[in-house]
Amino acid sequence: MAKSQWREAGVGLVVPALVIAVWQAAASLGWVNPQVLPSPWAVVHKWFEYLLPLQPYDPAAGSWLRWAFSGELIGDAMGSLYRVIVGFVVGAGLALPLGLAMGASPRVHAWLNPLVQLLRPIPPIAYIPLSILWFGLGNPPAVFLIALGAFFPVLMNTIAGVRQVDGIYIRAARNLGASGTTMFVRVMLPAAVPYILSGVRIGIGTAFIVVIVSEMIAVNNGLGFRILEAREYFWSDKIIAGMISIGLIGLGIDVLMNRLNNHLLRWHRGLDN
């Protein structure tokens, strides 16, 4: 199993390696303007420059560990992660109980579904003017936009998960004398967990998209803000370094979510393990 996983990981690196090789060749041969598309080496150099502390270590200024994590990249990444986490918790925290209620109760679904279907297609970016008008600048409008981005994926998947519970489970619970509350907690909710976790995964991805846009218009730190700043100074190497940082953070979170899914859904027959 381990050898197969390593082989699969190796195959997955082939295409990125080819892309980097072609990119480096184009930059080395002068086919592209380095101001527009710098070489991979220049991007890697800028990424480490972005990561490392701006000032030399001074023992009088504080601990070595604090100095080691004082680079721009660490601060920007922490700022973006903070907004993603807070916004996602708010959005998913509202979507989950509402989705459970709409999925379990046809009456609640009939009342709220028209409004949900009206608001769902509106992208969070369209709320930028209102978010600034309502909350001003800073973290509040960014958190509001991220919460909107996470809300609907979690809501719709939760509704679908509850409404698509296999009828045989419900009939079996009724035959065993389960009450409505017991049926919901012990039958419907566990059966909907795979859908809910899929919605959570999609919601986190959407939150990352929204945080970059929101940081470009509402705050003065974060990965999105730093990319916008680099664009204004024509620092294309720093733009790409910021984009790569976003990709690495998103990949890390997705891997963690995938492991969490596999752990929580060990009982689910659709899993390989």
Image: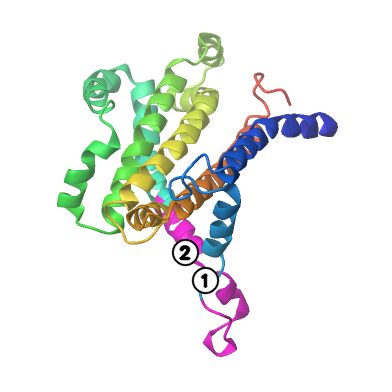
* Residue stretch rendered in magenta on the structure: 55-83
Give above or below for 225 relative to 15. Answer: below
Residue in the picture at 22% in, 44% down: 128
- Confirm whether the magenta stretch covers residue 66: yes
Residue in the picture at 32% in, 61% down: 220
Quarter of the image where the N terminus is located: top right
- Horizontal and vertical percent for residue 268? 64, 23
* Residues marked 1 and 2 touching at CB (< 8 Å): yes
- Horizontal and vertical percent for residue 51? 55, 63
* Mark 1 or mark 2, earlier in chain: 1
Q: Is residue 93 visible?
A: yes
Along the line of sight, the residue nearer the viewer: 242 or 249: 242
* Helix, strand or loop at mark 1: loop
Q: Mark 2 points at which residue?
A: 75
Q: Name the residue under label 1.
A: 70
Which quarter of the figure has residue 59?
A: bottom right
- Confirm whether the magenta stretch covers residue 115: no
Residue type indicated by callout 2: Gly
Residue 155 in the figure: left or right of residue 137: right
Which residue is farthest bottom?
60
Along the line of sight, the residue nearer the viewer: 81 or 34: 34
Give above or below for 225 relative to 103. Answer: below
Residue in the picture at 38% in, 25% down: 156
How many numbered circles does the render carry?
2
Which quarter of the figure has residue 10?
A: top right
